[in-house]
Image (cartoon, helix red, strand yellow):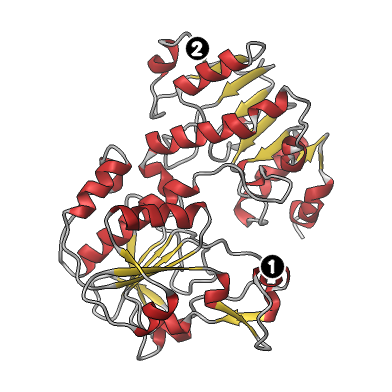
Amino acid sequence: MTFGIIKERKNPPDRRVVFTPEELVRLQNQFPQAKIKIEASDIRVFPDTAYAALGLEVTTNMTDCDVLIGVKEVPVEALLPNKKYFFFSHTIKKQPHNRKLLQAILDKNIELYDHETIVDAQNKRLIGFGRYAGIVGTYNAFRGFGMKYELFSIPKAETLKGKDELVAKLKRQILPPIKIVLTGNGKVGMGAKEILDAIKIKEVSVDNFLNKTYSEPVYVQIDVLDYNKRKDGQQLGNNNFYKNPQDYTSDFERFTKVSDVFIAGHFYGNNAPHILTNEMLKAADCKIKIVADISCDVDGPIACTIKASTIADPFFGYLPLESKEVSYTHPAAILVMSVDNLPCELPKDASEGFGEMFMEHVIPAFFNGDKEGILQRAKITESGKLTPRFSYLQDYVDGK
């Protein structure tokens, strides 16, 4: 079986890669029957020479590869027919802008495996860049805070070497006694927590966060039932929320009254209630002035996330009274950071971590008969059709 590491072709350029040179050598050693080819790239964080120096084949011809592995969407014109592809397709939530991509994948008889659909038997995601999104998004939250209030200026994360340098920059800043609320305890939320803990921000309980005053910066990490409540007042546990999100309403307003910074690292599912509404943001007692929406669901659960911002221009202002974008320097504006490709700012760290997860969870499935069902669960298309697990996408494919 021949694995091909493809060049990233999406704009703006993405320097990440699924496998570092060292990780591919490990793959080769562990599975000698595997053949590996690397498509030449002038943007990858690891240059072609780094792969070639370890004896790996760098080429411009990928037609003889069985499995092609990338990070972001592959342009329709670059798709090779009758192959297996792994990349983030951004189709499983019926994203309108990628309908033609999924249609082309079916037309070209491609087997599509989306990194997001690689899950265990309990449907828990096994790989992703979430940790690094959390790390960079939290760094950006502080960077935006410093800029909004003209307290300090720190460089963009993409100009720094890695997580350790981000932490070092943040540790040098003096912060006022702000309160930070963090949603989510998955990979994104825990990545954010990593930074907060590394720079010694004190973690406090929900009750203390809501009711106590502090003379130092503090944060609280909250789970779904801390910021949602059943409409009938019953307390039935997290699983009930996941199964019946339509029976819940947001309980986040109590946090808006005491929080200065909101770091959004939650997963947002279909039919779940909106978390931070415009009514909450317009309220006279809303204290939130910085929103770092790492999850970045545009026009979704966070009312001020009206667009995805970019690494080049990460911050914008949102004026709740008029529900519109303004300069973040506007006195009544909330500064919003909603970059949707945050791990691109730490391409080396993110690539190293992602490759380790892919090597652990996915590659063995090609050589052990997929005994744990990893590939079977992740497969979106096969033989020109959607697999049963993803048949719900048929109306999306049909343009209905």
Q: Mark 2 sits on what residue?
A: 56
Q: Image point 67% across, 56% down: which residue?
A: 94
Q: Nearer the viewer, residue 74 or 372?
A: 372
CA–CA distance between discs 2 and 1?
Answer: 47 Å
Q: Is residue 205 left or right of residue 240?
A: left
Q: Is residue 274 placed above or below 95 in the rendered structure?
A: below
Q: Is residue 36 visible?
A: no
Callouts 2 and 1 close, C-beta under 8 Å:
no
What's under tag 1, amino acid-wise?
A: Asn
Q: Nearer the viewer, residue 354 or 270?
A: 354
Residue at (27, 58) in percent of width and height? 200
Find residue 54 and report its horizontal and vertical position in percent: 44, 11
Name the element at disc 1.
helix
Query: Could you tell me if residue 66 is visible in this image?
Result: yes
The spot of residue 386 in percent (x, y) is 80, 44
Q: Which mark is residue 239?
A: 1
Between residue 367 and residue 270, name the one nearer to us: 367
**Dividing the image into 4 quarters, which one contains the N terminus?**
top right
The residue under the point 32% across, 50% down is 312
Q: Helix or strand or loop: what does disc 2 sit on? A: loop
Residue 261's spot in the image, x, y percent? 34, 71
Can you say which quadrant of the picture contains the C terminus? bottom right
